[in-house]
Every structure is written in structure tokens, then in C-alpha cells.
Image: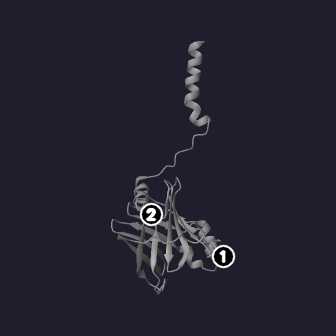
Amino acid sequence: MKRHCTYLFLGLIGMSDVAFGKAAPLVSIPTHDAFFNSIKALCGKAFQGKVSKDNVGNTFGDAELVMHIRKCTDSEIQIPFHVGNDASRTWILTKTGAGLMLKHDHRNKDGSFHSSTMYGGHTVDDGYVQVQSFPADAYSKALFIESGIAASTDNVWQMMIYPNRFSYRLIRPAREVQVDFDLDSTVSVPSAPWGYAD
């Protein structure tokens, strides 16, 4: 009887992780991990950017471009992208357990959500340690069609991280724009983006 009780006790200990709700692991693959961690390593820093490609004109005008790797956890990185005094954009990079997701959180100046917000995409392959691509997801495609910009359903966003440069790129047929940020030189950290607290 004593031996039976011991086995039962040990069995309950072994089952406890399942029976009492241990969270499932957030799985990922090496290329996604390395890419995510390279960006996370810059957390708290801000960098100035310049447009290196723009095949349709002066998308951002002459505004100063600054990205701020503002908040990082083991599964999410928030990166506000300031265009002059416009602090409406925050890139959100998330580990999903099925890859990496990029979303664009767009806010109005009062902090409310813009009518076009949270568009983006999800990785569909391993990508590379330095480069990941995010084709537009179903939500984004529906949003673009509803907003009258159906051409954007072909959007693919890319992020690139190298020792001296971070790049954000948008491509689709007949459209390409890329902003490069110099990682060798930090700039002053900007104020919180619209809708976020300092």
C-alpha cells in the first residue's frame, strides 16, 4: 500500500505541469530567433534614417526620420517610427509560435486608432538571420480593399538588420520604398508615439 501511494504521488507530480495549466512553450526557429534578438539587443536606442529607395516620389517629404526601439519583451518589440512631428506610426514585431508577425499601429494625435491600423503580415518561410519578409495578411487585404487602395493587397514589408544598418522596406508591383537607419550613431530618444504613455 505504501509503495502504491508513493507511485501515485510521483505520478501526480509528473502530471502537475499538464493538470495545473503550465503554459505551452512559444516555439520558434533559429533564423527568426536570431533576427528578433538582433533588433532586441538595440532596445532603448533611437536612430536617424534616410530614404534610400523611392520609385514614386518624395514619400516622406523632407521630414526627419527616426526609429526608436522603445519596448522589448521576449515575444514583442515596439518600434515607433517618427516622421518629423508625426508620431502616428509604431511597428510591432511579435513572435507568434508560427513565425514572426509585423503590424503597423497607426494612431491619431489624440491617441485614438486611425481608420487604417494594425495592417501588416506574417512570415511564410525561414527567411534569413538578417532579413525577414511579411506579405500582407488577410486582415490587411480586406482593410485595403475597404479603404479603396486595392493595389496595397500585394504589399510585402521587409525588415533588415545588419551590424551597421537597419532597413524598413515596402515593395509591391510598381512600388518600392526603403528607409535605412545608421546603427553606428544614436540620436536623442523621442517622446512617446501617439497613443502610448511615456
Give the x, y percent position of residue 8: 59, 22
Residue underneath mark 1: 146
- Point out the tag, 2 or 1, that comes first from the N-terminus: 2
In this view, which residue lies farthest toward the top? 1
Give the amino acid at mark 1: Glu
Q: Residues within 10 Å of mark 1 (few under 14, many from 20)?
A: few
Image x and y of residue 42, in percent: 41, 62
User: What is the CA distance from the residue labelled 2 to the residue labelled 1?
Assistant: 36 Å
Q: Is residue 134 left or right of residue 115?
A: left
Residue at which label 2 appears:
44
The quarter of the displayed image where residue 104 is located: bottom right
Q: Residue at x 52, y 80 (%)?
A: 85
Comparing 68 with 56, the one in front is: 68
The kind of residue tagged 2 is Gly
Q: Does residue 198 lie above or below 97 as drawn?
A: below
| Image quarter of the N terminus | top right
Helix, strand or loop at mark 2: loop
Quarter of the image containing the C terminus?
A: bottom right
